[in-house]
Amino acid sequence: MHDERPTPEESHKIVPGPSLDKVNKPAHKRESFRSVLSTIAILLIAPLIAILLTAFVFQSYQVDGPSMQTTLHDKDRLIVWKLPRTWSRLTGHDYVPKRGDIVVFTTPNLANFGQDPNKQLIKRVIGLPGDKIVVQNNILTVYNAAHPNGFRPDATLSYGHVIQGTNIDGEWTVAKGQLFVCGDNRFDSLDSRLFGPIQSKDIIGKLVVRILPVSQAMRF
């Protein structure tokens, strides 16, 4: 039998494999492709997240006008918190802020005063569902089950020191799902004393922070 054995020269021969360039090239292409996809995904998702946050969580606003002086001034930059309102809509409950909170809202009743009904206003919550609001002789009084003899929020709540008076006499009853709102500058404010209680479903959010001017930044 013929025994074929490699010669010493043949036994030391090395069969070359594929070059490193050929091995790494497909992997490098895959990594580059993944990087491009990740960049595209970030560019697409980031604006969507920003839109969702603005629509449902918080939003920046700039004050336009003097109706909330001296608490807020024209051109103040604010952050309005929307999450409680969003949650109330998801759960099917009315969003009822606290008395004294400052809220941003719309009301179709603005059309009766030649205003755009989609215009967003910022006012302070004075009356809650079940309240009767009476304004007489420059004094605002709230009557409800807890205060049958009435109380004066402008005199008893912390915001009251900025109120100079209230000039429009009248009586209003705040029904379920409604709020009575007023500007702090009562002598120059279009509010519930003129267009009546607003619907709680029309609230956009609650003021939480003033960020500009920096020297007057504060939480509410």
Image (spheres, helix red, strand yellow):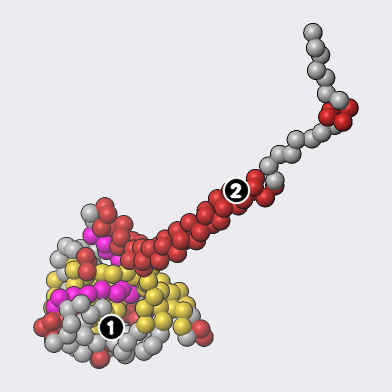
Residue projecting furthest to the right: 8
Res 178 → quadrant: bottom left
Residue labelled with disc 1: 183
Magenta residue check for 87 = no
Q: Position of residue 175 (x, y in %)?
A: 15, 66
Q: Is residue 158 above or below residue 147?
A: below
Q: Earlier in the sequence, mark 1 or mark 2?
A: 2
Q: Identify the secondary structure beneath mark 2.
A: helix
In this orientation, which residue lies closer to the viewer: 8 or 191?
8
Inter-mark Cα distance, 1 to 2 = 65 Å
Q: Is residue 193 above or below residue 173?
A: below
Q: Position of residue 166 (x, y in %)?
A: 24, 87
Residue projecting furthest to the left: 112
At a point 41% along the width and 62% down the height, the residue shown is 44
Q: Which mark is residue 27?
A: 2
Q: Is residue 216 above or below residue 156?
A: below
Amino acid type, callout 1:
Gly
Q: Main secondary structure of the magenta part?
A: loop
In this orientation, which residue lies closer to the viewer: 21 or 208?
21
At a point 25% along the width and 58% down the height, the residue shown is 89
Residue projecting furthest to the top: 1
Q: Which residues are magenta?
A: 94-109
Residue 164 visible to the viewer: no
At a point 28% along the width and 57% down the height, the residue shown is 88
At a point 26% along the width and 52% down the height, the residue shown is 91
| Quarter of the picture holding the C terminus | bottom left
On the picture, is 129 further left or further right than 164?
A: left
